[in-house]
Amino acid sequence: MKHIPLIMLGLFAVACARTVSMPEPPEGRVIYAEYCAQCHGPAGEGDGPWAAAMTPAPSDLTDLSENGEFPRAYVLSVIDGYDRTGLPGQEMPEFGLLLEGETVPVDVGDGVLTPTPRPLAALMVYLESIQG
């Protein structure tokens, strides 16, 4: 009888635990189409319908990787609006408030998992998938 409370506690913990999975590129593609394609184009090459009227032109998002490494922390900070220092397209809107929601653990390149809103992580995963 002494073990019943421990067993119940263990079952309660398992029942409360949620499995959090990283988003896949198709989830991010939907967000990209809604918020990014107007400027960056359907394929992310900076040739969206609004691009012709923009100075400077929107960035080519298919060419973000450097030496085969996708700069996750940098991309997240630009999308969120946290870091715009020295960006050629500082006119880009801040999407952080639009991309809130449940968080998922994202490794931003330093081995530390950072809680990141799922829509923001989904967009990052999609951008990582379209690198040339």
Image (cartoon, helix red, strand yellow):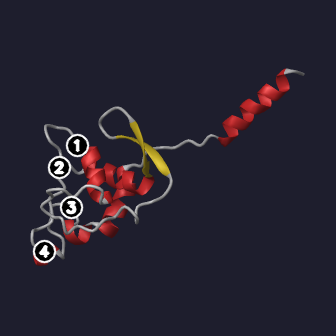
The percent coordinates of residue 69 (x first, y second) are: 20, 38
Residue linked to disc 2: 64
Q: How crowded is mark 2: few (under 14 residues within 10 Å), some or many (20 or more)?
A: many
Quickly name the residue at label 1.
70
Pointers 2 and 3 in contact (CB under 8 A)? no
Residue to which mark 3 is pinned: 43
Q: Given the image, on which type of amino acid does mark 2 rest?
A: Leu
Helix or strand or loop: what does disc 3 sit on?
loop
Mark 2 or mark 3, whichever is nearer to me = 2
Label 2, label 3: how far apart the Cα atoms are: 14 Å
Q: Which sits earlier in the primary sequence, circle 1 or circle 3? A: 3
- What is the three-letter code of the residue carrying label 4? Met
Q: Which of marks 2 and 4 is nearer the N terminus?
A: 4
Amino acid carrying mark 1 in the image: Phe
How far apart in space, not on screen, are marks 1 and 4 (Cα)? Answer: 26 Å
Residue for badge 4: 54
Q: Is mark 4 on a helix, strand or loop?
A: loop
| Callout 1 touching callout 2 (CB < 8 Å) | yes
Residue 71 picture location, percent across and down: 23, 44
Q: Residues within 10 Å of mark 4 (few under 14, many from 20)?
A: few
Q: Disc 4 and disc 3: Cα gap in Å?
A: 18 Å
